[in-house]
Image (spheres, rainbow, N blue to C red):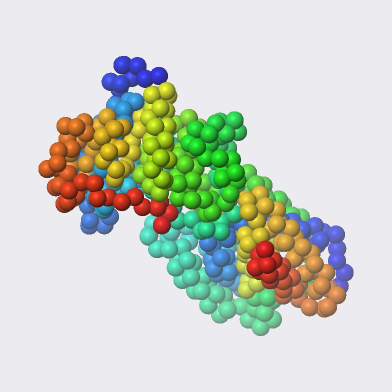
Amino acid sequence: MTLEPSAIALSIGAGAAAGLVGCFAVMRRMTLAADAISHIALPGIGVAILLRVHPILGGVAALLIGTLVVWGIENRTRLATETIIGVVFSTALAIGSLITSGEDLLEALFGGVGHLTLVEASLGLVVAVGVIVFVVRQRHRLVLALVSPEIAHTSGIDVPRLNLYFLLVFALTIALGLRYLGVLLVGSLVIIPAATAKRLARSLRGMLIISVAVSIASTTVGTLLSIALHRTPGSMIVLVAASFFLVSLVRRAGA
Amino acid sequence: MGSSADALRPALEVENLSVRFGQVAVLEHLSFTVPHGSALAIIGPNGAGKSVLAKALIGTLPFEGDIRWEENTKIGYVPQKLDIERDLPITGADFLDAKAAVARASQADVANLLELVGLKPEAAAKPIGALSGGQFQRLLVAAALVGRPTVLLLDEPTAGVDEPGQDSLNHTIERLRDERGLTILFISHDLSVVYQYATNVLCLSHGHVCFGAPRTVLTPQLLQELYGAPIGYHLHHDART
């Protein structure tokens, strides 16, 4: 297997998007949610395979619908987001594993190494750029809503709508990594680089920069290692990201 | 500068306000008016619904009845408690920049406000979780002032601030009221502050409501009824505990 330029561009774009979204996900204490939310993609992938549609499209559709369901329940009940996500997404995983079988299930869970078409790479890049633009432009609103939803509200921010946009962007970021990392590992691409950055940074700017750098390093080095070692890219990307996190633990402990 | 015509205009009219959580009524049929440029103190024992009233006034809690703010009201809000992780890598400056960007205020405004509330730039450069209770309150007051609000709504603004600091923050808020014609609503446990700064006082205590000038309304008998004990026993709490 060789590495095409479009694949390199996509792994950089997806890495940057995941690094940025991850910062706010980690600061909003969505660490568990990130893992669970990705599971909703599975029934979508299963249905897409049954209907002979591109699996990622099914995954994206399921992620977006799942996000709307979570947001809707969150706004109408006083249940904690973690509780809602826990229930909705484990149910999705159960349904998904019933309708997906054999090798397809394994690839959906852990990601695959299949050939990336130019259309897939271009679409992926468009989504990645969209996610990056959203986080960069909305970062001030996201910071206010994070520190105090009431202060954000009195500053004229529609907090429930901002939360919905963030969840949708989050779901799109998960979708970006779905192909390589699979349903079970994709959450870690969003969370680990941001968690590493949170340990090392002393300001928002610092956290965003470190997180993006760790994320891009993980996706590119992980992909290269997977080719060199003939392993699936998902596992290698997560292992590289986890090593950065380990280094951050040692560094902060020694600091 | 507040003129006499301004003073006659209500900045806020509340009529028949009720807030319920399920079957429990926290506030019931509350009515009061806040004249433009005045300072209203909201007092009452813990659990009387002071912070609930503040949240209803800013529109983040569902309520029954009418809350009418003067046209073009811009509220600067200082919340009582914030649930913030200590290791959050957001500095005071990041927070103020965010507020300034959303309110379209300039960096010069932010620098002036830091000086006004007595927060040093070195302190503002620290992560907000690493600030002392007093520094954090000053930061919140500065943030509330970004974007030139017409109303300040402060939920125990000096909680956790040392005594000289409390005096200077209270003086600053009063000076702003005079200079900018701001209308102030503040929740306080400190009756000496209420006497000194409030034009009117609204007391809340499970079904018992009073409203009027502090010296007329706050009789020893009423305070005994409100708090169930002689006055002067309330301690300040750190805003982030």
Residue at the extreme bottom of the image, as rendered: A102
Residue B148 lies, with reference to residue B221, above or below; the image says: above
Q: Quadrant of residue B218?
A: top left
Count of picture labels: 0
Q: Position of residue A163 (x, y in %)?
A: 51, 52
Q: Is residue B79 visible?
A: no
**For this view, does B209 lie left or right of residue B154?**
left
**For this view, does A48 lie left or right of residue A230?**
left
Quarter of the figure that contains the C terminus of chain B: bottom left
In percent of the image, x 48 and y 47: which residue is there? Answer: B136
Quarter of the figure that contains the N terminus of chain B: top left
Q: In which quarter of the image is residue A137?
A: top right
Residue B79 lies, with reference to residue A197, above or below; the image says: above
- Report the front residue among B17 and A181: B17
Q: Where is residue B81 in the image (x, y as percent from the top left)?
A: 40, 51
**For this view, does A182 lie left or right of residue B49?**
right
- Report the front residue among A20 and A92: A20
In percent of the image, x 60 and y 33: which residue is there? Answer: B107
Q: Position of residue A156 (x, y in %)?
A: 47, 39
Q: Position of residue B93 (x, y in %)?
A: 58, 43
Residue at the extreme right of the image, as rendered: A2
Q: Can residue A185 be seen in this view?
A: yes
Residue A37 lies, with reference to residue B81, above or below; the image says: below
Q: Quadrant of residue A50?
A: bottom right
- Report the front residue among B59 and B232: B232
In percent of the image, x 14 and y 38: which residue is there? Answer: B219
Residue B142 lies, with reference to residue A252, above or below; the image says: above
Residue at the extreme left of the image, as rendered: B221
In percent of the image, x 12 and y 43: which residue is there? Answer: B221
